[in-house]
Amino acid sequence: MADLRGKTLFITGASRGIGKAIALRAARDGANVVIAAKTAEPHPKLPGTIYTAAEEVEAAGGRALPLVVDIRFEDQIRAAVDRAVEAFGGLDILVNNASAIYLAGTLETPLKRFDLMYQVNVRGTFACSQACLPYLKAAANPHILNISPPLNMEPRWFAPHVAYTISKYGMSLCVLGMAEEFRPDGIAVNALWPKTMIATAAVRNLLGGEAAIRHARKPAIVGEAAHRVLTQDSRSCTGRFLIDEDVLREAGVEDFSGYAVDPDCEPMPDLFL
């Protein structure tokens, strides 16, 4: 299939950053986008709300359904899925993008932070997948895409931030298991991860501020790579741990300078690669 016209995407954490970039790329095809995120009111440090994201999706050519969803709570997930199906007649794609981050060592990680990362990253991914799967089984080319890293078991990716690594790898383990579990149903389950740092609120607020942003790429590169994955045949493209730049290179893209926040700065590699 060439595009996502008429397809319905349920994207968690789509009010900003990578989630919104994936939503906007799908909207350019004329897709229906469910913006499932927590931010309904403007936040002093986090730009955008589900409603401003919905306006951008519709301006880009898609149809938007903004829903307040905290994916730590099963009832909110299932209510949102029900509303999405009622509004658009079904679901074709789930993007598990919502994520919590706290980069600290074992002794410096409060258990409430550990719990938040586990509840959002692992449990939230599992719960959203579980709620969407019955509808994905009925779709023509169904996909689940987790924004999570390849499973790299080198100790250097665990030692500095064990709790965060466990939580992100939990999302990737969902890919490993669900891809095989739902292969007979023709549901693709893949992971996508950026090769470089991406200019998101997390990078700006937690990983170095504006200095780090200068060495990052724009979220649009992940949006474009996700589009390439989500338009593949779900029966032949599943169980893969994909990197955004590699996906685009396979599609013939050679110049990535347009994605740089600052073309004069070398992009900084992302974690886990």
Image (cartoon, rainbow, N blue to C red):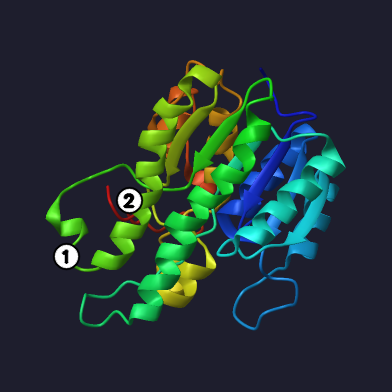
Mark 2 or 1, nearer chain start? 1
Residue 112 higher or lower than 98, as above or below? below
Q: Is residue 247 visible?
A: yes
Label total for image: 2
Q: In the visual, does 224 lie left or right of 28? A: left
- Which residue: 21% across, 57% down? 157
The disc labelled 2 sits on which kind of residue? Tyr
Look at the numbered discs 2 and 1 and tell me whether their residues touch, using CB distance below 8 Å. no
Task: Name the residue that disc number 2 marks.
Answer: 169
Q: Residue 201: x and y, percent?
A: 53, 69
The span from disc 2 to disc 1 (Cα, nearest Å) is: 14 Å
The foreground one among 202 and 218 is 202
For the residue labelled by badge 1, is the local secondary structure a helix, a strand or a loop?
loop
* Position in image of residue 131 (x %, y %): 62, 45
Horizontal side of residue 149 vs 143, given as left or right: left
Is residue 43 placed above or below 148 in the rendered structure?
below
Q: Position of residue 244 (x, y in %)?
A: 45, 39
> Which residue bears the numbered disc 1?
159
Decide which of 147, 187 is in the foreground and name it. 187
